[in-house]
Amino acid sequence: MNDLDDAYHDISLDSLDDDLLFIYLISKYPSLTQADQRRRYNKIDVHSIHEREFRHLTRFDYTDLCQLACLLQIPETFTVSRHRFSRIEGLFILCVRLAFPYRTETLSIFLGWSPTAISRASNYILLHIQANWQYLLHDFNSGHLTEERLTLYAQAISNKGAPLDKCWGFLDCTIRAISRPIQWQRELYNGHHREHSLKYAAVKCPDGLIRHLYGPIPGRRNDNHLLKQSQLLERCLEYAPEFYLYGDSAYGKYQVLLSPWSRIELSEAQFEFNLQMSRVRECVEWGFEDILRLWTSLTFTRSQKLFGTLVGAQFKVATLLTNLHICLYGCQTSRYFNLNPQSLEDYLKFGPKPTFQDLTLSE
Protein backbone atom coordinates (compact mmCIF):
# COMPACT_ATOMS: atom_id res chain seq x y z
CA MET A 1 0.00 0.00 0.00
CA ASN A 2 2.85 2.39 0.84
CA ASP A 3 4.51 1.59 -2.47
CA LEU A 4 1.28 2.39 -4.29
CA ASP A 5 0.92 5.70 -2.46
CA ASP A 6 4.52 6.62 -3.24
CA ALA A 7 4.01 5.79 -6.90
CA TYR A 8 0.79 7.79 -6.96
CA HIS A 9 2.41 10.94 -5.61
CA ASP A 10 5.20 10.68 -8.17
CA ILE A 11 2.83 11.15 -11.09
CA SER A 12 0.08 13.55 -12.04
CA LEU A 13 -3.46 12.43 -11.26
CA ASP A 14 -4.62 13.61 -14.67
CA SER A 15 -2.18 11.19 -16.33
CA LEU A 16 -3.80 8.16 -14.70
CA ASP A 17 -6.04 5.98 -16.79
CA ASP A 18 -9.56 5.81 -15.34
CA ASP A 19 -9.18 2.10 -14.60
CA LEU A 20 -5.83 2.64 -12.85
CA LEU A 21 -7.33 5.44 -10.80
CA PHE A 22 -10.20 3.20 -9.78
CA ILE A 23 -7.76 0.46 -8.70
CA TYR A 24 -5.81 3.01 -6.71
CA LEU A 25 -8.90 4.34 -4.93
CA ILE A 26 -10.09 0.86 -3.98
CA SER A 27 -6.63 -0.03 -2.65
CA LYS A 28 -6.49 3.23 -0.71
CA TYR A 29 -9.76 2.39 1.07
CA PRO A 30 -9.14 -1.32 1.84
CA SER A 31 -12.22 -1.73 4.02
CA LEU A 32 -14.34 -1.37 0.91
CA THR A 33 -12.73 -4.37 -0.76
CA GLN A 34 -13.51 -6.83 2.05
CA ALA A 35 -16.54 -9.00 1.43
CA ASP A 36 -18.01 -8.57 4.91
CA GLN A 37 -17.72 -4.78 4.67
CA ARG A 38 -19.11 -4.84 1.13
CA ARG A 39 -22.24 -6.60 2.31
CA ARG A 40 -22.82 -3.96 4.97
CA TYR A 41 -22.31 -1.15 2.42
CA ASN A 42 -19.99 1.01 4.52
CA LYS A 43 -20.32 4.25 2.60
CA ILE A 44 -17.37 6.43 1.73
CA ASP A 45 -17.04 9.80 3.46
CA VAL A 46 -17.14 12.23 0.55
CA HIS A 47 -15.87 15.03 2.81
CA SER A 48 -12.56 13.25 3.47
CA ILE A 49 -11.55 12.48 -0.12
CA HIS A 50 -8.28 14.09 -1.22
CA GLU A 51 -8.86 17.27 -3.22
CA ARG A 52 -7.15 15.97 -6.37
CA GLU A 53 -9.09 12.72 -6.21
CA PHE A 54 -12.33 14.61 -5.64
CA ARG A 55 -11.74 16.82 -8.69
CA HIS A 56 -10.94 13.80 -10.85
CA LEU A 57 -14.01 11.89 -9.70
CA THR A 58 -16.58 14.70 -9.95
CA ARG A 59 -14.86 17.20 -12.30
CA PHE A 60 -15.43 19.86 -9.60
CA ASP A 61 -13.43 20.96 -6.57
CA TYR A 62 -14.96 20.03 -3.23
CA THR A 63 -15.80 23.61 -2.24
CA ASP A 64 -17.29 24.32 -5.67
CA LEU A 65 -19.46 21.20 -5.55
CA CYS A 66 -20.76 22.22 -2.12
CA GLN A 67 -21.58 25.68 -3.45
CA LEU A 68 -23.19 24.16 -6.52
CA ALA A 69 -25.42 21.86 -4.44
CA CYS A 70 -26.71 24.89 -2.53
CA LEU A 71 -27.24 27.09 -5.59
CA LEU A 72 -29.12 24.30 -7.38
CA GLN A 73 -31.40 24.17 -4.33
CA ILE A 74 -31.10 20.43 -3.93
CA PRO A 75 -32.90 19.34 -0.73
CA GLU A 76 -30.49 19.29 2.19
CA THR A 77 -31.34 15.63 2.81
CA PHE A 78 -33.46 13.14 0.89
CA THR A 79 -34.28 9.46 1.22
CA VAL A 80 -34.35 6.87 -1.56
CA SER A 81 -34.36 3.09 -1.32
CA ARG A 82 -34.34 3.42 2.49
CA HIS A 83 -31.02 5.28 2.32
CA ARG A 84 -30.64 8.83 3.52
CA PHE A 85 -28.39 11.13 1.48
CA SER A 86 -27.14 14.65 1.95
CA ARG A 87 -27.28 16.91 -1.08
CA ILE A 88 -23.47 16.81 -1.33
CA GLU A 89 -23.54 13.01 -1.43
CA GLY A 90 -26.33 12.98 -4.01
CA LEU A 91 -24.59 15.39 -6.36
CA PHE A 92 -21.30 13.55 -5.80
CA ILE A 93 -22.88 10.24 -6.85
CA LEU A 94 -24.47 11.78 -9.96
CA CYS A 95 -21.19 13.36 -11.08
CA VAL A 96 -19.27 10.12 -10.55
CA ARG A 97 -21.87 8.15 -12.54
CA LEU A 98 -21.72 10.62 -15.43
CA ALA A 99 -17.93 10.90 -15.34
CA PHE A 100 -17.15 7.17 -15.43
CA PRO A 101 -18.90 4.44 -17.46
CA TYR A 102 -18.93 1.92 -14.62
CA ARG A 103 -21.84 -0.29 -13.65
CA THR A 104 -23.59 0.52 -10.39
CA GLU A 105 -22.41 -2.82 -8.99
CA THR A 106 -18.82 -1.71 -9.57
CA LEU A 107 -19.41 1.74 -8.10
CA SER A 108 -21.01 0.23 -5.00
CA ILE A 109 -17.67 -1.41 -4.12
CA PHE A 110 -16.02 1.99 -3.97
CA LEU A 111 -18.90 4.23 -2.83
CA GLY A 112 -20.29 1.83 -0.24
CA TRP A 113 -23.98 2.22 -1.08
CA SER A 114 -26.03 -0.53 -2.65
CA PRO A 115 -26.42 -0.48 -6.45
CA THR A 116 -30.11 0.32 -6.06
CA ALA A 117 -29.39 3.25 -3.75
CA ILE A 118 -26.73 4.62 -6.12
CA SER A 119 -29.06 4.39 -9.10
CA ARG A 120 -32.03 5.99 -7.38
CA ALA A 121 -30.01 8.72 -5.67
CA SER A 122 -28.37 9.76 -8.94
CA ASN A 123 -31.74 9.68 -10.74
CA TYR A 124 -33.27 11.83 -8.00
CA ILE A 125 -30.63 14.53 -8.45
CA LEU A 126 -30.77 14.13 -12.24
CA LEU A 127 -34.53 14.73 -12.35
CA HIS A 128 -34.32 17.56 -9.84
CA ILE A 129 -31.79 19.45 -11.98
CA GLN A 130 -33.68 18.78 -15.20
CA ALA A 131 -37.04 19.77 -13.75
CA ASN A 132 -35.85 23.02 -12.20
CA TRP A 133 -32.97 24.23 -14.34
CA GLN A 134 -33.38 23.02 -17.92
CA TYR A 135 -34.88 26.41 -18.82
CA LEU A 136 -31.27 27.67 -18.88
CA LEU A 137 -30.90 25.73 -22.14
CA HIS A 138 -34.00 27.33 -23.70
CA ASP A 139 -32.20 30.28 -25.35
CA PHE A 140 -34.28 33.45 -24.82
CA ASN A 141 -36.47 31.83 -22.17
CA SER A 142 -33.43 31.66 -19.89
CA GLY A 143 -33.45 35.43 -19.36
CA HIS A 144 -29.73 35.74 -20.10
CA LEU A 145 -29.82 36.55 -23.82
CA THR A 146 -30.37 40.29 -23.49
CA GLU A 147 -29.52 42.73 -26.27
CA GLU A 148 -26.44 43.79 -24.33
CA ARG A 149 -25.16 40.22 -24.10
CA LEU A 150 -25.92 39.48 -27.76
CA THR A 151 -23.96 42.59 -28.73
CA LEU A 152 -21.07 41.39 -26.58
CA TYR A 153 -21.15 37.99 -28.30
CA ALA A 154 -21.27 39.55 -31.77
CA GLN A 155 -18.33 41.81 -30.97
CA ALA A 156 -16.24 38.89 -29.68
CA ILE A 157 -16.90 36.87 -32.86
CA SER A 158 -16.13 39.85 -35.08
CA ASN A 159 -12.88 40.51 -33.21
CA LYS A 160 -11.63 37.04 -34.20
CA GLY A 161 -11.80 37.94 -37.88
CA ALA A 162 -15.36 36.93 -38.75
CA PRO A 163 -16.84 39.03 -41.60
CA LEU A 164 -20.17 39.24 -39.74
CA ASP A 165 -20.89 41.90 -37.12
CA LYS A 166 -24.23 40.64 -35.76
CA CYS A 167 -23.57 36.91 -35.33
CA TRP A 168 -24.11 35.88 -31.70
CA GLY A 169 -23.72 32.09 -31.79
CA PHE A 170 -23.17 28.93 -33.80
CA LEU A 171 -25.83 26.31 -34.47
CA ASP A 172 -25.06 22.65 -34.99
CA CYS A 173 -26.46 19.18 -34.37
CA THR A 174 -24.87 16.22 -32.68
CA ILE A 175 -25.75 12.55 -32.91
CA ARG A 176 -25.33 10.36 -29.84
CA ALA A 177 -25.25 6.62 -30.37
CA ILE A 178 -27.42 4.45 -28.13
CA SER A 179 -27.76 0.75 -27.48
CA ARG A 180 -29.99 -1.02 -29.98
CA PRO A 181 -33.53 -0.56 -28.62
CA ILE A 182 -36.15 -3.27 -28.38
CA GLN A 183 -38.68 -0.98 -30.10
CA TRP A 184 -38.56 1.75 -32.78
CA GLN A 185 -35.35 0.40 -34.28
CA ARG A 186 -36.12 1.73 -37.76
CA GLU A 187 -37.07 5.17 -36.42
CA LEU A 188 -33.90 5.48 -34.36
CA TYR A 189 -31.48 4.13 -36.96
CA ASN A 190 -29.25 6.69 -38.65
CA GLY A 191 -28.21 5.41 -42.07
CA HIS A 192 -25.29 7.81 -42.45
CA HIS A 193 -23.62 6.78 -39.19
CA ARG A 194 -25.03 3.24 -39.36
CA GLU A 195 -26.07 3.14 -35.73
CA HIS A 196 -29.11 3.66 -33.55
CA SER A 197 -28.97 7.15 -32.18
CA LEU A 198 -30.62 10.26 -30.81
CA LYS A 199 -30.07 13.73 -32.20
CA TYR A 200 -29.72 17.10 -30.43
CA ALA A 201 -29.37 20.67 -31.68
CA ALA A 202 -27.31 23.23 -29.78
CA VAL A 203 -26.22 26.86 -30.00
CA LYS A 204 -22.71 27.54 -28.74
CA CYS A 205 -21.76 31.10 -27.78
CA PRO A 206 -18.28 32.69 -27.67
CA ASP A 207 -18.14 32.61 -23.87
CA GLY A 208 -18.24 28.81 -24.09
CA LEU A 209 -21.79 28.35 -22.79
CA ILE A 210 -24.44 26.37 -24.66
CA ARG A 211 -27.48 28.65 -24.66
CA HIS A 212 -29.83 26.41 -26.61
CA LEU A 213 -30.25 22.66 -26.52
CA TYR A 214 -33.15 20.87 -28.16
CA GLY A 215 -33.76 17.16 -28.26
CA PRO A 216 -33.61 14.31 -28.27
CA ILE A 217 -35.37 13.27 -31.44
CA PRO A 218 -34.92 10.01 -33.39
CA GLY A 219 -31.59 9.77 -35.16
CA ARG A 220 -33.08 9.24 -38.63
CA ARG A 221 -34.45 12.80 -38.71
CA ASN A 222 -32.42 15.45 -40.53
CA ASP A 223 -31.09 18.71 -39.12
CA ASN A 224 -33.80 20.90 -40.64
CA HIS A 225 -36.54 18.81 -39.04
CA LEU A 226 -34.85 19.32 -35.68
CA LEU A 227 -34.57 23.07 -36.32
CA LYS A 228 -38.25 23.32 -37.24
CA GLN A 229 -39.38 21.35 -34.21
CA SER A 230 -37.32 23.53 -31.85
CA GLN A 231 -38.95 26.78 -33.13
CA LEU A 232 -35.62 28.49 -32.53
CA LEU A 233 -35.91 30.73 -35.59
CA GLU A 234 -39.33 31.98 -34.51
CA ARG A 235 -37.97 33.03 -31.12
CA CYS A 236 -34.95 34.69 -32.73
CA LEU A 237 -37.27 36.71 -34.96
CA GLU A 238 -39.35 37.71 -31.96
CA TYR A 239 -36.59 38.64 -29.51
CA ALA A 240 -33.54 39.54 -31.64
CA PRO A 241 -34.47 40.12 -35.30
CA GLU A 242 -31.37 42.26 -35.93
CA PHE A 243 -28.98 39.46 -34.88
CA TYR A 244 -28.39 36.09 -36.50
CA LEU A 245 -26.88 32.66 -35.96
CA TYR A 246 -24.44 30.82 -38.18
CA GLY A 247 -24.82 27.14 -39.07
CA ASP A 248 -23.61 24.66 -41.64
CA SER A 249 -24.82 24.53 -45.23
CA ALA A 250 -27.54 21.98 -44.46
CA TYR A 251 -29.69 24.67 -42.83
CA GLY A 252 -29.90 27.10 -45.74
CA LYS A 253 -30.31 30.84 -45.22
CA TYR A 254 -32.94 32.74 -43.25
CA GLN A 255 -33.26 36.23 -41.84
CA VAL A 256 -31.81 35.12 -38.50
CA LEU A 257 -29.70 32.16 -39.68
CA LEU A 258 -26.83 32.28 -42.16
CA SER A 259 -24.81 29.43 -43.64
CA PRO A 260 -21.79 29.03 -45.95
CA TRP A 261 -22.02 29.79 -49.65
CA SER A 262 -22.52 26.81 -51.91
CA ARG A 263 -19.25 25.26 -53.05
CA ILE A 264 -20.29 25.40 -56.70
CA GLU A 265 -18.62 28.26 -58.62
CA LEU A 266 -17.57 30.30 -55.60
CA SER A 267 -16.21 33.78 -56.15
CA GLU A 268 -13.03 34.78 -54.38
CA ALA A 269 -14.98 36.88 -51.86
CA GLN A 270 -17.41 34.04 -51.15
CA PHE A 271 -14.55 31.58 -50.69
CA GLU A 272 -12.83 33.96 -48.26
CA PHE A 273 -16.12 34.40 -46.34
CA ASN A 274 -16.52 30.63 -45.95
CA LEU A 275 -12.90 30.27 -44.87
CA GLN A 276 -13.05 32.97 -42.20
CA MET A 277 -16.35 31.73 -40.78
CA SER A 278 -15.19 28.11 -40.69
CA ARG A 279 -12.26 29.13 -38.50
CA VAL A 280 -14.42 30.73 -35.83
CA ARG A 281 -17.20 28.16 -36.13
CA GLU A 282 -14.98 25.32 -34.91
CA CYS A 283 -15.87 26.31 -31.35
CA VAL A 284 -19.24 24.56 -31.60
CA GLU A 285 -17.43 21.27 -32.05
CA TRP A 286 -15.34 22.10 -28.98
CA GLY A 287 -18.60 22.53 -27.08
CA PHE A 288 -19.80 19.00 -27.77
CA GLU A 289 -16.30 17.73 -27.01
CA ASP A 290 -16.36 19.49 -23.63
CA ILE A 291 -19.49 17.56 -22.68
CA LEU A 292 -18.08 14.19 -23.69
CA ARG A 293 -14.65 14.88 -22.21
CA LEU A 294 -16.10 15.70 -18.80
CA TRP A 295 -18.89 13.11 -18.74
CA THR A 296 -17.41 10.09 -20.48
CA SER A 297 -20.24 7.71 -19.55
CA LEU A 298 -22.23 9.34 -22.37
CA THR A 299 -19.77 7.84 -24.85
CA PHE A 300 -20.35 4.28 -23.62
CA THR A 301 -23.05 3.17 -26.04
CA ARG A 302 -24.12 0.04 -24.18
CA SER A 303 -25.09 2.06 -21.11
CA GLN A 304 -27.29 4.37 -23.20
CA LYS A 305 -30.41 2.20 -23.15
CA LEU A 306 -33.50 4.04 -24.31
CA PHE A 307 -35.95 2.02 -22.21
CA GLY A 308 -33.55 1.31 -19.34
CA THR A 309 -31.92 4.64 -18.47
CA LEU A 310 -32.86 8.32 -18.61
CA VAL A 311 -30.86 8.89 -21.78
CA GLY A 312 -32.26 12.29 -22.73
CA ALA A 313 -32.17 13.62 -19.18
CA GLN A 314 -28.56 12.51 -18.80
CA PHE A 315 -27.42 14.47 -21.85
CA LYS A 316 -29.37 17.59 -20.86
CA VAL A 317 -28.09 17.56 -17.30
CA ALA A 318 -24.56 16.80 -18.52
CA THR A 319 -24.84 19.90 -20.73
CA LEU A 320 -26.02 21.97 -17.77
CA LEU A 321 -23.19 20.66 -15.60
CA THR A 322 -20.75 21.49 -18.40
CA ASN A 323 -22.06 25.06 -18.46
CA LEU A 324 -21.61 25.25 -14.69
CA HIS A 325 -18.11 23.84 -15.04
CA ILE A 326 -17.31 26.53 -17.63
CA CYS A 327 -18.66 29.25 -15.33
CA LEU A 328 -16.20 28.09 -12.67
CA TYR A 329 -13.11 27.17 -14.67
CA GLY A 330 -13.54 28.55 -18.19
CA CYS A 331 -12.94 26.55 -21.36
CA GLN A 332 -11.07 26.56 -24.65
CA THR A 333 -13.83 28.49 -26.43
CA SER A 334 -13.92 31.35 -23.91
CA ARG A 335 -10.14 31.63 -24.04
CA TYR A 336 -10.15 31.58 -27.84
CA PHE A 337 -12.63 34.47 -28.05
CA ASN A 338 -11.13 36.18 -25.00
CA LEU A 339 -14.57 36.44 -23.41
CA ASN A 340 -15.06 35.30 -19.83
CA PRO A 341 -18.27 33.38 -19.06
CA GLN A 342 -20.72 34.46 -16.40
CA SER A 343 -20.03 33.72 -12.77
CA LEU A 344 -21.82 30.76 -11.25
CA GLU A 345 -24.03 33.01 -9.13
CA ASP A 346 -24.98 35.16 -12.13
CA TYR A 347 -25.79 32.13 -14.29
CA LEU A 348 -28.14 30.72 -11.64
CA LYS A 349 -29.48 34.07 -10.42
CA PHE A 350 -33.03 33.56 -11.71
CA GLY A 351 -33.49 30.52 -9.49
CA PRO A 352 -35.31 27.28 -10.29
CA LYS A 353 -38.25 27.30 -12.67
CA PRO A 354 -39.97 23.89 -12.53
CA THR A 355 -41.10 22.71 -15.95
CA PHE A 356 -42.79 19.49 -14.85
CA GLN A 357 -43.54 17.69 -11.60
CA ASP A 358 -40.34 16.61 -9.90
CA LEU A 359 -40.11 12.92 -9.03
CA THR A 360 -39.05 12.08 -5.49
CA LEU A 361 -38.30 8.38 -6.04
CA SER A 362 -38.53 8.06 -2.25
CA GLU A 363 -39.72 5.01 -0.45
Image (cartoon, grey):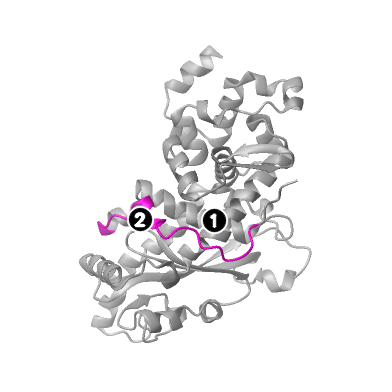
Q: Main secondary structure of the magenta part?
A: loop
Q: Is residue 331 left or right of residue 121?
A: left
User: Amino acid under label 2?
Assistant: Asp
- Looking at the rendered image, the quarter that the N terminus falls into is top right
Q: Residues within 10 Å of mark 1 (few under 14, many from 20)?
A: many
* Vertical comparison of 126 with 76: above or below: below
Q: Is residue 104 left or right of residue 211?
A: right
Q: Which tag is nearer the camera, tag 1 or tag 2? A: 2
Q: Earlier in the sequence, mark 1 or mark 2?
A: 1
Extent of the magenta region: 337-358
Residue situated furthest top in the rendering: 2
User: Which quadrant of the figure has residue 313?
Assistant: bottom right
**Hey, which residue is sitting farthest front in the picture?**
76
- The location of residue 251, given as percent across then percent down, is 45, 80
Which image quarter: residue 338? bottom left
* Residue sitting at x 30%, y 74%: 167
| Residue placed under numbered mark 2 in the picture | 346
* Residue 64 seen from this side: yes
- The answer for how far apart the CA atoms under marks 1 and 2 are is 19 Å
- The location of residue 181, given as percent across then percent down, is 74, 62
Q: Is residue 341 magenta?
A: yes
From the image, tell me which residue sits under label 1. 317
Camera-side residue of 42 and 79: 79
Up-down relation of residue 249 to residue 119 (above or below):
below
Disc 1 marks a residue whose amino acid type is Val
x, y (%) of residue 161?
22, 68
